[in-house]
Image (cartoon, grey):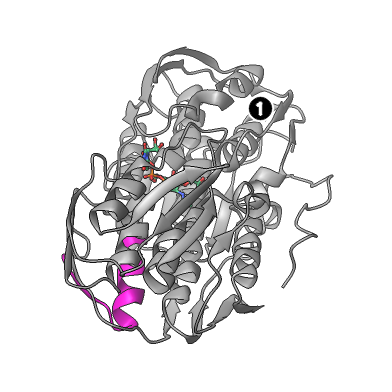
Amino acid sequence: MVGGTRLAGEVAVGGAKNSALKLMAAALLATGESEISNVPRITDILIMAEVLRRLGCEVAFDAGTVRVRSPEKPGTEADYDLVRRLRASICVLGPLLARRGYVRVAHPGGDAIGSRGLDMHVAGLERMGAEVSGEHGFVIANAPKGLHGATIWLEFPSVGATENLLMAAVLAEGVTEIDNAAREPEIVDICRMLTGMGAKIDGVGTSRLSVEGVPALQPVRHRTIGDRIVAGTWAYGAAMTRGEVSVRGVEPAFLEIALEKLVTAGAEVTSDPNGFSVRMQRRPTSVDVSTLPFPGFATDLLPMAVGLASLSEGTSFITENIFDGRFMFINEMVRLGADIRVDGHHAAVRGRERLSSAPVRATDIRAGAGLVIAGLCADGVTEVGNVHHIDRGYPDFVADLCGLGASVERTSVPDDLEFRF
Ligand code: EPU
């Protein structure tokens, strides 16, 4: 992409990847066809569809709507060849265990943003009566007499563990309390879908969820919430390029702190229930950011916060508290001329007036998007490699950027040809 253009105009965001993936897994909980709308067409969704197909589901995707027809007895095994490509496939663990009393899912391992354990998923399922073991790279969970309600206290409000335990608890016998549960909008979304299927969940949106198990659930129609991380990417893109962007299709409440930081940096932000606008007319002022579970500043927006700080007047301190490898992409930002020093999970970023173009490589989805936006603020032509990472989370990224006036071209072929609907 060529640096120096302001992002300006309106952009619509689609459904949230991190919600839609789990909503598709939740469809395993009821025999019959569930319909999930506002699903983004991205690689991760295509892989999840393949995971479900191999479990015996019929999956179809049409104009943003996914239909998952789940059989009476879904399969019980998810292989490494798919799980390694999509860590989120671990979310079939809870629903399959609840329905079949046995499941064998490949251990996804770590990835570029960190080590990413499963101990809280496992401990919670054990509290509900499952025997869980690890063998030959698989997580094997067994509950021949079914799962029962339990009191579970999560050491950390893990998004994935909360989702897996919720999906196990809705069909368990008795009441399960999940304390210190994650409160991300995606958790609220899955609770709403499960409730629509007949589940009984109290405390939705709080850190204490109480689930009364029911014997069976019914298929449902559900609309996925808007993608707050894609929306946040545009918000930070507008501020970094000193542009003016109106973002539609997302509740601004999902991004309150991220937008508040932009105001502190000097942007004007206006919101309504279905979106917001960001206008930046001057060089941003430095702001400190510390990532935290929702409602804190989202770790997935950390690359955008680093990008903003790289161009701000003054020094910003950026702290990552969720993933130990999130700073992997910092070296790429330094190649673009950013002045960043990292000490453990803290980064001191001294802002520069402009960045300078260089070939860089995406290390993960969010870093990839962050590097592209940073490239828009660099003198000359920046080339970002490994853009298949961006395809995992941003549908139509290049088209949206061009629609906002950026000069961006894709030179490699999308990498999702293996997985089609
Ligand atoms: N953790 C453990 N043990 C566990 C579970 C988690 O140690 O049993 C640790 C993880 O290693 C990590 C921290 O707890 O350090 C938080 O992990 P969490 O379970 O909350 O994250 P996740 O479910 O693996 C989801 C999103 C991520 C997003 C995080 C945090 C999906 C598919 N992924 O991951 O999204 O960053 O929540 O909000 O929902 C992305 O979309 O690019 C992405 C990485």
Q: Position of residue 174 (x, y in %)?
A: 17, 72
Q: Tell me where the magenta segment starts and ends, as one range.
A: 185-203
Name the amino acid, label 1.
Answer: Ala
Q: Position of residue 377 (x, y in %)?
A: 62, 31
Nearest the camera: 7 or 180?
180
Mark 1 closeness class: few <14, some 14–19, many ≥20 residues within 10 Å: many
Q: In screen coordinates, is 289 left or right of 153?
A: right
Q: Which residue is depicted at the point 30% across and 43% down?
A: 293
Nearest the camera: 307 or 153?
153
Q: Position of residue 385 (x, y in %)?
A: 75, 35
Question: Disc 1 designates what residue?
Answer: 378
Q: Quadrant of ligand 1?
A: top left
- Does the magenta segment cover residue 101? no
Q: Answer above or below: position of 13 versus 255.
A: below
Picture quadrant of residue 382 = top right
Q: Which residue is depicted at the point 51% across and 30% down?
A: 307
Q: Which residue is depicted at the point 35% across and 45% down?
A: 259
Tell me the element at label 1: strand
Q: In screen coordinates, is 203 left or right of 56?
A: left
Q: Answer above or below: position of 312 versus 276.
A: above
- Does the magenta segment cover residue 198? yes
Magenta stretch secondary structure, dominant: helix
Residue 226 can be seen in this image: no
Q: Quadrant of the N terminus?
A: top right
Q: Answer above or below: position of 213 versus 376.
A: below
Q: Position of residue 162 (x, y in %)?
A: 31, 55
Q: Answer above or below: position of 188 versus 228.
A: below
Nearest the camera: 408 or 125?
125
